Image: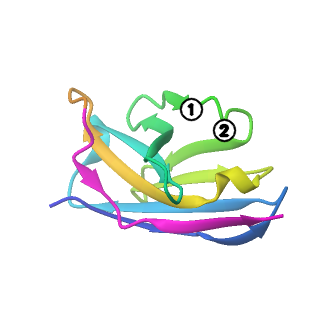
Amino acid sequence: QVQLVESGGGLVQVGGSLRLACSASGRTFSNYVMAWFRQAPAKEREFVAALNWSGGVTRYADSVKGRFTISGDNAKDTMYLQMNSLKPGDTAVYYCAARLLRDRGYDYWGQGTQVTVSS
């Protein structure tokens, strides 16, 4: 059973930084894509960034390119999202997700962590 647990959310001022972490367990994740999604109040969940766990290839939403960095620590089975130059529009619940490389949909989700950017 795959388990994903996010941490690192909180309240930060505009222009500040936060680092989210997603601790993964239950599988060997070498054939997985790990990703971050977010959902703001009254909005649909949206893709933020993804990481091919074995190849290291990354992908970002246009809205976060140049500000956010996704990375992984294989030894700790932990994925990170470094968020810099935060804006009020980044306020959302951030979710960690995982899927097999061959699949399209994400099968596993964390419980989410709140990020609030105050102006």
Q: In this view, does 82 lie to the left or right of 25?
A: right
Q: Position of residue 6 (x, y in %)?
A: 45, 66
* Residue 40: percent from left, percent from top: 53, 56
Q: Name the residue under label 1.
A: 60
Callout 1 amino acid: Tyr
Query: What amino acid is at disc 2?
Result: Val
**Residue 109: image tag:** none
Instruction: Answer few, some or many: residues within 10 Å of disc 1's Cα (few below 14, many 20 plus, some between 14 and 19).
Output: some
Asked if 118 appears above or below 72 in the picture, the reply is below
State which quadrant residue 104 falls in: top left
Inter-mark Cα distance, 1 to 2:
7 Å
The x and y percentages for residue 54 are 38, 34
Which residue is located at x 44 percent, y 47 percent? 44
Q: In which quarter of the image is the N terminus?
A: bottom left
Label 2, residues with CA under 10 Å away: few <14, some 14-19, many ≥20 = some
Q: Over which residues does the magenta segment extend?
A: 105-119
- Determine the residue positioned at 52% across, 60% down: 41
